[in-house]
């Protein structure tokens, strides 16, 4: 069999954007195999945005609907996905290594009694084998793996696979399933304030470290982020998260989030190796630090040596000005 | 409460990575090894549960080479009661193989709770916990930052993009720990002495068929060192110009 199953995510009845990346990655494998991409969504009802998947290369979009699937229901969803993967005889199953995908993919793989190549940054075929590249040791090395198990279950690191438009005719169907949601249930989702972007998903991240001196001073970074008009999130070093100045969810680094935004500002962050682990794949890095020997300047594309309390307000002003 | 914690020996997070001569593994020369930081949260959580219950047992279990005995001793020094090493010549790159072996060992142990880290900082695979749960047929919640257990039921919080999920599940269960769950203790000298006398069983590792093969390891392209645009607020206009015209990110 040469078809590829793309497992795509929805939240609150809308398809998540990372799904375009998943279908793009799946398409790449299917092209090499000469097969089709079948996208699978598990939800309570048909979701908005599903029709867009054909544009990225999905030959078929299947929405499996069941009562228990309005919110994430790991056990039921894993059961449905594994069953379809098995019955469809797919060569590969592709998911996103999001918070949900990291939880779901290993369950699916274990149900199929196969391995999982998790959080990969590259995927392709080498002869009959699915081959992947995945970062290890906090991004300090890349491992190349050949997945011999079939199906090959692969999760893709978000923000790495740039969606490619590959329009297909595409059929869509909705099938009702009776699978139980399972024993693990999401009782509530506490959403961040409306309009707040997650550091892991924002195209621009403005991170602050101990150089900010006091938690209140993060206001400077919030203003800078706001100047980008809903494009930027505020991140933090572990030092300030451990000090209780910022939430755990904002931490960038080895024991925090891995981010690869288009633009990353490190403000009053020294650039410890564990911090770099979480942001070194950002496209452009800007460092603002008063110590010209701070290690962050070794990875930054552009640096300003100076007092952040003078530089940041000026920068906010300038960004507002150029963005008009 | 009877609790098992799965722990892994990993290179310290400060490690400068060099590729070994085989072209596909870490050159371990001069590398310091530690207890995986996320497993430290898991061990701490287990100890607190046992202490709160006033009774019970905390067992730690590792798949690893003989050197992992040292890692197990670290957890015993923190306060765990006994250790099991499933000894392998090398830990396979396949999380499923590790999960199979752990499941076989834990299967009939009658544990109320099995804790793991959300990921090991070396392979960062995020998979052994949920795979282990599948093998054992137990419910599983991953990457939890808060955990409360009462009357055979657990409630945990886990971070998702842009929010926090509050998750309910029945016990026994497998829970994987994220940073924020607790503040791990340092082993005291007394604990280190006591650890030497605690039981540590060594058994052979059997992970079954391995479904992934490592074909190579490489180092990422070094980021080119950029340039200092200037000093102080006066450099801001030039920085913004470069971001627009050269980097084209604005
Ligand atoms: C197992 C492990 C995991 C870790 N995981 C992470 C992680 O995920 N993320 C992470 O970030 N860290 C992590 N760390 C911690 C890491 O080693 C550093 O301690 C931490 O990143 C330092 O934070 P910082 O840069 O904010 O503080 P510091 O290192 O104290 O740096 C503050 C910087 O601010 C500058 N500064 C001060 N005042 C000003 C001013 N007025 N204007 C401009 N600049 C100024 C200083 O020159 C300095 O460079 C981890 C450590 C371990 C051991
Ligand atoms: N070799 C191992 N021995 C024991 N536990 C392990 C091993 N590998 C992984 N684990 C557990 O599974 C968690 C996730 O690891 P991983 O899936 O490798 O990222 C770790 O934090 C440990 O709790």
Image (cartoon, rainbow, N blue to C red):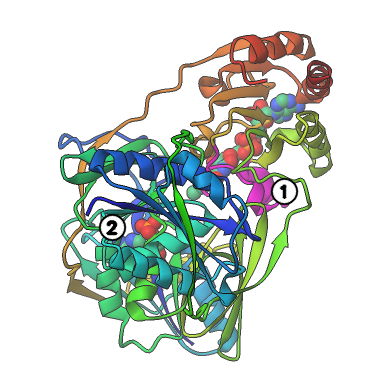
Q: Is residue B198 visible?
A: no
Write the start and end of the magenta stretch as one range.
A237-259
Q: CA distance from mark 1 to mark 2?
A: 44 Å
Which chain hosts label 1?
A
Taken as a whole, is the magenta stretch helix, strand or loop?
loop
Residues marked 1 and 2 touching at CB (< 8 Å): no
| Viewer-proximal residue among B133 and A28 | A28
Q: Quadrant of residue A310?
A: top right
As drawn, the label of residue A246 is: 1
Vertical relation: A51 (above or below) A69: above
The answer to whether residue A243 is magenta is yes
Label at residue B188: none
Where is ligand 1, by quadrant? Answer: top right
| Position in image of residue B144 (x %, y %) | 56, 65
Classed neighbour count for the residue bearing mark 2: other residues with Cα under 10 Å, few (<14), some (14–19), many (≥20): many
Residue drawn at x 33%, y 87% is B109
Residue B96 visible? The answer is yes
Reply yes or no: does residue A205 show up in magenta.
no
Q: Which mark is residue A90?
A: 2
Measuring 26% from the left and 71% from the top, which residue is drawn there?
Answer: B100
């Amino acid at each position: 069999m040469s078809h590829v199953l793309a497992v795509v995510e929805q939240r609150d009845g809308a398809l998540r954007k990372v799904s375009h990346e998943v279908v793009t990655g799946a398409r790449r494998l299917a092209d090499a195999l000469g097969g089709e991409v079948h996208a699978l969504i598990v939800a309570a009802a048909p979701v908005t945005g599903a029709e867009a998947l054909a544009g990225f290369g999905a030959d078929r979009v299947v929405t499996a609907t069941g009562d228990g699937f309005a919110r994430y229901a790991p056990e039921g969803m894993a059961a449905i996905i594994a069953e379809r993967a098995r019955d469809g005889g797919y060569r590969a199953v592709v998911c996103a290594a999001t918070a949900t995908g990291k939880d779901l993919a290993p369950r699916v793989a274990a149900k199929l009694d196969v391995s999982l190549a998790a959080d990969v940054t590259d995927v392709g075929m080498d002869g009959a084998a699915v081959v992947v590249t995945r970062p290890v040791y906090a991004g300090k090395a890349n491992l190349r793996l050949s997945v011999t198990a079939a199906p090959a279950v692969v999760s893709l690191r978000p923000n790495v696979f740039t969606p490619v438009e590959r329009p297909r005719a595409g059929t869509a169907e909705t099938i009702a399933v009776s699978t139980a949601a399972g024993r693990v249930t999401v009782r509530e989702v506490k959403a961040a304030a409306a309009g707040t972007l997650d550091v892991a998903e924002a195209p621009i991240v403005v991170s602050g470290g101990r150089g900010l001196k006091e938690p209140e001073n993060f206001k400077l970074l919030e203003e800078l982020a706001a100047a980008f008009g809903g494009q930027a999130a505020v991140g933090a070093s572990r030092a300030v998260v451990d000090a209780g100045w910022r939430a755990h969810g904002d931490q960038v680094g080895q024991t925090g989030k891995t981010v690869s935004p288009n633009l990353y500002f490190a403000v009053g962050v020294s650039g410890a190796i564990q911090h770099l682990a979480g942001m070194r794949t950002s496209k452009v890095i800007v460092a603002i630090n008063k110590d010209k020997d701070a290690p962050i300047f070794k990875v930054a594309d552009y640096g300003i040596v100076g007092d952040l309390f003078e530089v940041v307000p000026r920068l906010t002003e300038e960004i507002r000005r150029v963005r008009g | 409460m009877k609790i098992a914690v799965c722990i892994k020996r990993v290179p310290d997070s400060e490690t400068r990575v060099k590729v070994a001569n085989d072209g596909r593994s870490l050159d371990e020369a001069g590398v310091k090894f530690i207890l995986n930081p996320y497993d430290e949260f898991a061990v701490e959580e287990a100890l607190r549960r046992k202490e709160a219950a006033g009774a019970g047992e905390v067992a730690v279990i590792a798949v690893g080479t003989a050197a992992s005995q040292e890692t197990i001793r670290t957890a015993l020094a923190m306060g765990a009661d006994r250790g099991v090493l499933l000894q392998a010549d090398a830990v396979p790159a396949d999380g499923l193989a590790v999960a199979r072996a752990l499941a076989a060992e834990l299967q009939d142990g009658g544990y109320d709770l099995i804790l793991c880290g959300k990921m090991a900082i070396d392979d960062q695979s995020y998979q052994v916990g949920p795979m282990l749960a599948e093998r054992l047929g137990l419910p599983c919640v991953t990457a939890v930052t808060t955990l409360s257990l009462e009357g055979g039921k657990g409630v945990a919080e886990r971070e998702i993009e842009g929010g926090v999920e509050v998750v309910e599940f029945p016990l026994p269960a497998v829970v994987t720990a994220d940073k924020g769950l607790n503040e791990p203790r340092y082993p005291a000298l007394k604990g280190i002495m006591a650890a030497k006398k605690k039981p540590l069983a060594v058994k052979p590792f059997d992970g079954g068929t391995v479904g992934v093969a490592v074909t190579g390891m490489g180092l990422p392209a070094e980021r080119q060192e950029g340039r200092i645009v200037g000093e102080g607020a006066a450099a801001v206009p030039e920085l913004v110009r470069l971001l627009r015209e050269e980097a084209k990110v604005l």
